[in-house]
Amino acid sequence: MTISYKWLSEYLPVTVEPERLARILTSIGLEVESFEKFEEVKGGLKGLIIGEVLSTEKHPNADKLTLTKVSIGNGEPLQIVCGAPNVEPGQKVVVAKVGTTIYPVNNEPITMKVATIRNVESHGMICAEDEIGVGTSHAGIIVLKKDSKVGTDAAEYFQPYEDWIYDLGITPNRMDAMSHWGVAKDVCAYLAHHDKKELRPKIPSSNSFKIDNKSLPVSVSVENTKACQRYSGVSITGVTIKESPQWLQKKLKAIGLRPINNIVDITNFIQHETGQPLHAFDADELKGKKIIVKNLPEGTKFITLDEKERKLSKEDLMICDAEGGICIAGVFGGLHSGVTGKTENIFLESAWFNPVDIRKTSFRHGLRTDAATRFEKNIDISNTVLVLKRAALMIKELGGGQIASDIVDVYPDPARKTEVSLKYHYLKKLSGKNYHPDTVKNILVSLGFEIVKDGIDEIRVVVPFSKPDISLPADIVEEILRIDGLDNIEIPRAITITPSVEENYLGHTLKEKVANYFVGLGFHEMMTNSITNAAYFTEEEKQQMVKMMNSLSTELNILRPSLLETSLEVVARNLNHKNSNLKLFEFGKGYFTSSAGKYLEIEQVCMVISGDRADQSWKGKTIPADFFFVKGVVSSVLELLGINPETVEALPVPKLHDHITYKANGELVAGAGKVNPKVLAQFGIKQPVYFAALNWEAVLRLTLKQTLSIKQLPRFPSVLRDISMVVPKHLSYAEVEKSVNNLKLAKLQEVKLFDIFESEKLGKDKKSIAVSFTFLDEEKTLTDKEIDGWMGKIMIMLESDLKAEIRK
């Protein structure tokens, strides 16, 4: 929300300095996110002076340049070389002296220096419109009125508009502060409380409103009274469409709005003044002189003001005339019903539309207008007629014309004000401060509340329609606190704290342990959006996904089922910024829809690796990341958590090549693989990427079941034996390891692959692998006979089951 200091000050009964006002706004809950000076003319014409051209003569070395003598009211006349064709003696002009900075339109600022132009010194510049920002013409220098006083500051002559602009961070519950009137009421309440004065905002009166004639009646009917609880309107004839006066244009420009014409500018002005959106229809375009508020059939085509054809939903509320839709209610006007340069008669609308309906329609059509933003936060339903009168009077003043109908006010079921009771002991309990009842009443009254009961220990108030979010005693406490100021709450000498019991402390501890382990390996933690793009997935995949009903954009319309896609977005961004060596991890959730239609969340931890895993150094060359590095990291993390997978098996999946899964206690605990190049192409990634994910919920379950035990280090030595064998080329080491483990040799501690060799000399489609076996008995020293027996069983199994040829 943008607030103008000068505009707001018109409604304040006392002058408040801009800096103090910024502090007040933040104190009352309207956080000032930025506070900047607005200048209609950049630089504010500082340093520019009105001068008089005393004499002119041709430049001795240039035909198109003129040598001038210019008086600026003090000291010697300045010698200035001028290139303008219209410079003449006796003219009053704008002069930029040496040292003055000018701000040309669409160009960088220039600071005047003594310049030598064709061997003649020039001490400044006689300015054109575009050179100082007061216009766009560069046809010649600015020639001022003859009675202009020499030596006067140009800023005093032109009086460019300056203001201070506050950008407020308005929370969704503060619709009452989405206008200059609303902010003025809050500021007055603060000043009245802190300065101990009775202050009320200076709200313009509409008492002079009167009907001139009834020559243009427009009938109004509301068919959907739930979506449009109140609709007010009035006709104005004989209006002249023209440019708005400068004061109005300057106010709108200061808050970032572009002036269009007097009628449109008045509706924009009123919206930012009062918070009530208005819409002006060309009354001559209203077929049958009727306004009908209703919903149209699904798929009805409608052309909006931006000349786009849109298909309406049956839930979109429409403003219609006798022949069809003319405006999407509260959101956007139609192409043929708005005010144009030819408009003479208008029908002015001021209404209350259901916030939920407006928000849905606004997002459905991608039309995030100022009006929709206000309606969706719930405007003051009691204000429609008052604002309508205010706008009609302004239109008469700035556009001429006559009020040509009664005010139509369709309000079949008037809203009832909310009543809330507040006990003083509850106020003290929640706020931590003992307020005097008179202080409470004064604050609430200054905010527009009506007191209906004033008891010894309780107060009952009626909530104004401008604060529809207030319904609980806690809401009233918040209103009192923000006007009094949170800084004014006393800090007690003793503070009692009830320690909380963390139910899942072990889960957080393990998460921290794993995160620290990743960081120790050189990984960086990433945090990605749980909402992603449905375009990344196939139609089959989308069947089990959680779709967004009101997505903020077409690229953020689905909850991610895994962390792969959002991780690849991070990889792509880093690669685009020339950061090609990546080791990243993240804790996050995947979201699914079950076959029963229920939503499921599964917490995961993923890692993504791309580029080199080790940089070049004096000790060695770069080492590119590969599948086995990823596999090793996954195995290390599981070992860190005390999980010993029963199986590590290959499981083909479409998005990952060489995909393997880890299972422990019958549960899938992890998976890893190389990302499919076709998937990488969706993200514009051209280098290999490796991805792994742990099912964190399964990992936690297994870890929490563990019983820690302590035992001494082995007293007896382990024995290492190895076997070299020739096997079929397609045979994986996982099959070898699985077959050996199936022998269930009690004293076999570890099986490890330490060499692979391929050569045509071994035979077609053959390879040689070397595997080591570690044996250990914790009770005694193993004998050669025992070890030879176990190795014999292993070799027999390898030859019979895997068709391996043992190399001697």
Image (cartoon, rainbow, N blue to C red):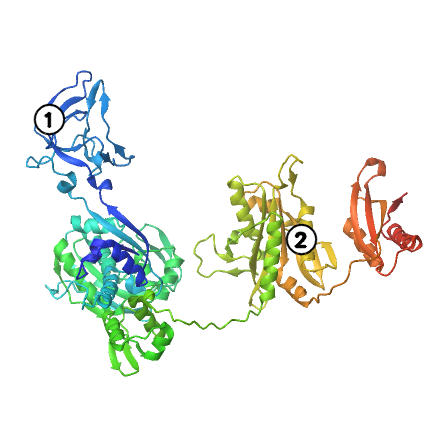
Which residue lies under the disc numbered 2? 634
Per the image, the residue denoted by label 1 is 88
Q: Where is residue 293 in the image (x, y as percent from the top left)?
A: 29, 66
Q: Which numbered disc, 2 or 1, marks the residue that appears first in the sequence?
A: 1
Residue 638 placement, left or right of 309: right
Residue 729: x %, y % from top left = 79, 44
- Camera-side residue of 797 and 294: 797
Residue farthest to the left?
Answer: 147
Query: Does residue 706 appear to the left or right of 367 in the view shown?
Result: right
- Indicate whether 606 appears above or below 464: above
Quarter that holds the C terminus: top right
Residue 722 drawn at (x, y percent) = 85, 47
Between 236 and 208, the one lying in front of the other is 208
Residue at 88% in and 59% down: 780
Furthest toward the bottom, the residue is 456
Instruction: Report if residue 160 is visible in the image.
Output: yes
Label 2 neighbour load within 10 Å: few <14, some 14-19, many 20+:
many
**Secondary structure type for disc 2:** helix
Q: Which of 134 and 653 is in front in this view?
A: 134
Indicate left or right for 337 with 247 as reference. Answer: right
Q: Which-is-in-front pick, marks 2 and 1? A: 2
Q: Distance between the residues labelled 2 and 1?
A: 85 Å
- What's the mark number on residue 67? none
| Front position in the image: 642 or 176 | 642
Residue type highlighted by circle 1: Glu
Question: What residue type is disc 2 on?
Answer: Val
Q: Is residue 44 above or below residue 556?
A: above
10 Å crowding of disc 1: few (<14), some (14-19), many (20+): some
Estimate the x, y position of residue 347 in percent, counting from the top left: 20, 60
Above or below — where is 238 with respect to 405?
above
